[in-house]
Amino acid sequence: MTNEELQQYVEQLSLDVFALPFRHVALFNERLRTTGGRYFLTDHHLDFNRSHLGDLNTFRGIVIHELCHYHLHLRGMGHRHQDQDFKEWLQRYGGLRYSPRLEEAEKKNHFYECEKCGTLYRRKRKMNPERYRCGRCRGKIFYKSS
Ligand SMILES: [Zn+2]
Ligand SMILES: [Zn+2]
């Protein structure tokens, strides 16, 4: 999904779910790591985490969550997580309370194995095995699984 497609998706979802137009900018932010999305109070744009796209249902819930912040804030209603308005809107419109997938994604491990001695390495992030050697025998390392 490109940024333009994301923009269209958010605009359409806003109309379908809230019957309200989304008139600002929606973008993928590659640096978002701990959240699925973010609403900016200053310029009203939305950032989204691309890593949630694998599960469109979850992604939809995240977009609705951010749109709740957006529409409530623009209407001068309680737009923060602890506000009653926000809690009601999340329920009414089917927004995700948290980003469950992200926690999974962060806990997900990648396994690498040494060709020579079979030592298994676990990494939180994907890395290029060509650039590393086994810490035990200096053998080559290959990607095993996640
Ligand atoms: Zn939020
Ligand atoms: Zn080794």
Image (cartoon, helix red, strand yellow):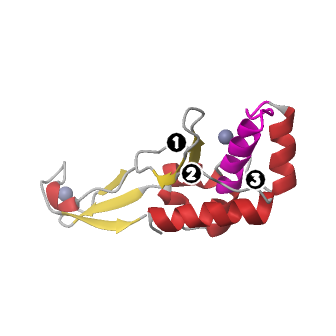
Depth check, front residue: 94 or 78: 78
Residue type at mark 1? Thr
Magenta extent: 62-82
* Relative image position of residue 38 (x, y in whole percent): 57, 43
Residue designated by label 2? 102
* Relative image position of residue 66 (x, y in whole percent): 66, 47
Q: How many numbered marks have been drawn onto this rendered protein structure?
A: 3
Q: Is residue 99 left or right of residue 96?
A: left
Q: Is residue 1 above or below residue 104?
A: below
Depth check, front residue: 22 or 102: 22
Quadrant of the image containing the C terminus: bottom left
Q: Is mark 2 within 8 Å of ligand 1?
A: no
Q: Is residue 92 left or right of residue 123?
A: right
Q: Secondary structure at mark 2?
A: helix
Instruction: Characterize the local packing of mark 3: few (<14), some (14-19) or many (20 or more) Cα atoms within 10 angstroms.
Output: many
Residue designated by label 1? 34
**Labels 1 and 2 touching (C-beta < 8 A):** yes
Q: Is residue 124 left or right of residue 51?
A: left
* Relative image position of residue 21 (x, y in whole percent): 70, 56
**Mark 1 vs mark 2, CA separation in Å:** 7 Å
Can you tell which mark lies on residue 95? Answer: 3
**Labels 2 and 3 touching (C-beta < 8 A):** no
Earlier along the polypeptide chain: callout 3 or callout 1?
1
Instruction: Characterize the local packing of mark 1: few (<14), some (14-19) or many (20 or more) Cα atoms within 10 angstroms.
Output: few
**Mark 2 vs mark 3, CA separation in Å:** 15 Å
Depth check, front residue: 52 or 129: 52
The residue located at (20%, 67%) in the rendering is 115
Earlier along the polypeptide chain: callout 1 or callout 2?
1
